[in-house]
Amino acid sequence: MLASIRFGYSSWGLIVKKGVVAVLVLLAVVVLVSPAIVGRMAEKSMDENLNWAASEAGEVTVTSEAFTRGWFSSEGQHRIELRDGELLTAIQTLSGPVEASDLPVLVISTRIDHGLIPVTSMSRDKGSLAPGLGSAISTMRVELPDGEAIDVPGTIYSKFSLGGALHSNYLLEAGEHAEGGMTARWAPTDINVTTHPVSGETAFKGTVGPLSVVDDNQKISLSALSFEGQQAPTKFGIAVGNVEFALDDLAVVVDSSQPTGIKAMSVIATTDIDGDDINASATMNMASQDVPGLGEVAIDMVFDLSGADAAAMGRVQQTLESIGASQDPMAMYSAVEDDLKALFTYGFDMNFDQLDVTLPQGTISSKMLFSFGEEDPATFDWTSLLLGTEASIDLSIPEAVVAMIVQANPEAAMVIGGGYLVLRGDAYEMKAQLKKGLLTVNGAPIPIPLGAVR
């Protein structure tokens, strides 16, 4: 009996020891072997995320310069270059003719600590043993066309999840830099971005503290900037989601002149897909710095779009993005004419529930509602669109603002004389309605030359 008990204990002890050995072997595989396997997966994940970001932007190219893969860690560099697109066009508009090859290049240098448990990351800042494909730390520099390289302050800390998502955190500590008569100062900045190259979903959140750039005759300053949102692609080529953006005191001063820019701006926007329809809403509030000849100007807008054809809207957006900014509006219209007709044939509602412009003399208030009915594609033209549209416009302009407009442009008085603006109290008002091709302004019918609308 005693022998059988001892045999039982010894067998159980052997099983326990084997279990401990198995756990140790598994741990060794996770810690020592997995880095080599996961390293390749992390490299692929990084390239996938960068290439996905480039394809989404549509205006940059991403080139992998080098990638040295080690057992526990790897290092690589990627070059990001601007190519043809709206951003290049905007730069050319501001700075004059310039080729993409003459623009600076952003170089991102990255070290990845890989492994299901990235133990080597513990030797650096922000290291973590959290399971995943690995963690990375990236620094940036700008290479100028003449070969000079300028380090970009701040560091990007990234984590590759087991599902392939990339979580990146850009951190910038407060600091300043002076060079060539220019001084830049900045407060702490914290930006978080999560991307998934498979689903295409993106989430972002960030805050930018006060910053300024000053040289001998110019100063650019920003008090605060914050943003947050998430976006997801759709089969229609339109990203949906929500975005919140807030900016405080963006000012430009040249030669000690009066500051120009934006005192405050906030935007909240949402888009979603309902079947084949796209819906969108946006609220914007903006107050400018002093505008020469006008003073401080504020704009408050509440916008809503519902029931629009997502496929047609997506084609319009993609076409405009592909042709870039054009100096010829008719060329842009020709490129999207068929898709615009398809959009209006489908029908949708578009409302400006509030569109107010505040000047020192008072606030111009307006509300505009448009409902475009569904049309027969075989017989649709712009004349039929007018006949099938219901719209209303309510407008109120302070008397002082009207006086200012008439003084600057005496011909504007014809609008008052024609009965389009009626003085009620201390403001001129207009109430316009369009229904079944009949337009009325302040209760009076206004003929529409339908034959001229084609």
Image (cartoon, rainbow, N blue to C red):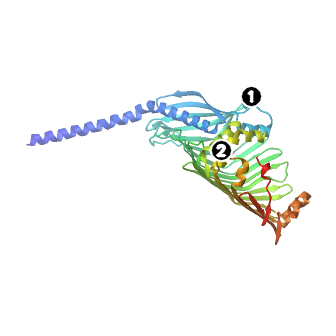
Give me the residue at 82% from left, 44% from top. Answer: 216
Count of marks placed on residues: 2
Count neighbours of disc 2 (C-alpha within 10 A) and say few if under 14, some if 14 to 19, many if 20 or more: few
Residue 193 rendering spot, x and y as whole percentages = 57, 45
In this picture, residue 319 sits left or right of residue 74 = right
Q: Quadrant of the N terminus?
A: top left
The answer to which quarter of the image holds residue 93 is top right
Please rate how many residues cluster around mark 1, counting C-alpha atoms within 10 Å: few if below 14, some from 14 to 19, many from 20: few
Element assignment for label 1: loop
Residue 86: image location, x then y, percent: 71, 39
Report which residue position mark 2 lands on.
378
Q: Circles 1 and 2: CB distance less than 8 Å?
A: no
Spot occupied by residue 160 in the image (x, y as percentages of width and height): 50, 39
Q: Which residue is mark 1?
A: 146
Which percent across, then down, holds residue 38? 45, 33
Return the disc, 1 or 2, that comes first in the chain's sequence.
1
Query: Foreground mark, 1 or 2?
Result: 2
Disc 1 residue type?
Asp
Q: Tell which of 394 and 205 is nearer to you.
A: 394
